[in-house]
Image (cartoon, grey):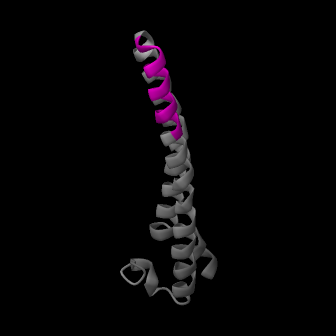
Amino acid sequence: MLFGNPLVSQKGSVFVLAASAIGAGISMIAGIGPGIGQGYAAGKGAEAVGRRPKLQSTVIKTMLLGQAVAQTTGIYALIIALLLLFANPLLKLLG
C-alpha cells in the first residue's frame, strides 16, 4: 500500500508515508473501544428485554442510539487513518 501511493514520487516522502502508515494503524486501535461498548450495550439490552418483555421497543431504541454514539469514535479513527494514507497533509512540509 505504501509504494502504490502516488505521493511517493516526491523526494523524501517515503519516510513520511511510512510513518503515516504506522500512525494509521495505531489510530485504528481506537476500534477496540466501540466494539467493547457495543457488545456491553447489546448484552445489557438483552438482559433488560428478558426482564421486561413489554418494554422491548423502548429498550431496543435506546440500545441502538447508545451503539450509534459509541461507534463515532471508530469512525473518527477511520477518517484519520484514511487521511494519513491518501491525503497526507504532512507532505506539504517537505517543500
Residue reaching furthest bottom?
11
Residue reaching furthest top?
54
Work out whether 60 lies above or below 39: above
Considering the image in quadrants, where does the N terminus appear? bottom left
**In front here: 66 or 20?**
66
Considering the image in quadrants, where does the C terminus appear? bottom right
Residue drawn at the location 56% of the way across and 86% of the way down: 15
The percent coordinates of residue 61 (x first, y second) are 44, 21
The percent coordinates of residue 79 (x first, y second) are 49, 55
| Residue 70 shows in this picture | yes
Q: Quadrant of residue 57?
A: top left
Work out whether 22 lies above or below 34: below
**In front here: 78 or 3?**
78
Q: Which residues are magenta?
A: 40-53
Work out whether 80 lies above or below 53: below
The percent coordinates of residue 7 (x first, y second) are 44, 78
Instruction: State the predominant SS element of the stretch in magenta.
Output: helix
Residue drawn at the location 46% of the way across and 34% of the way down: 42
Q: Quadrant of residue 8?
A: bottom left
